[in-house]
Image: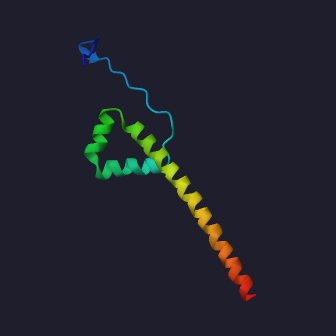
Amino acid sequence: MELKYTRTGDYELPNLTLKDNKKGTINKYGMLRLNHLKHYKKSLYTTLLMKDELTNHLVSVSKDAETLLNKLMKSYKKEMKNYLKEIKKLTNLNG
């Protein structure tokens, strides 16, 4: 990869540009992942930050966690309905 430089005063500064990051928001789970990376996976955090992939990673984690949470909530709702039906049957038998 060849870098081009721009002269600014006595210095030559590299012309750096950032890649387009994924569109999306970083939710609670993305922030938890960021905190985990900063405190327990410092080398991975630094690598992602230097490659400008940290935001993409956090958005991806946020979306994956949100999808999993939605699946779990649907599953819990179905189970809860079944439990409520069983409880109603038992109360009708005793009452």
Question: Residue 34: percent from the left, percent from the top?
Answer: 39, 47
Q: Is 44 positioned to the left or the right of 91 in the image? A: left
Residue drawn at the location 63% of the way across and 70% of the way down: 82
Q: Which of the 4 image quarters holds residue 48?
A: top left
Residue 95 lies, with reference to residue 49, above or below; the image says below
Q: Is 82 positioned to the left or the right of 39 in the image? A: right
Question: Residue 12: percent from the left, percent from the top?
Answer: 25, 15
Residue 21 lies, with reference to residue 84, above or below; the image says above
Identify the image quadrant of the N terminus.
Answer: top left
Question: Residue 49: percent from the left, percent from the top?
Answer: 33, 37
Residue drawn at the location 33% of the way across and 21% of the way down: 16
Question: Residue 11: percent from the left, percent from the top?
Answer: 24, 15
Q: Is 81 positioned to the left or the right of 4 in the image? A: right
Residue 83 lies, with reference to residue 66, above or below; the image says below
Q: Which of the 4 image quarters holds residue 8?
A: top left
Q: Nearer the viewer, residue 39 or 47?
A: 47
Q: Which of the 4 image quarters holds residue 74?
A: bottom right
The answer to whether residue 69 is visible is yes
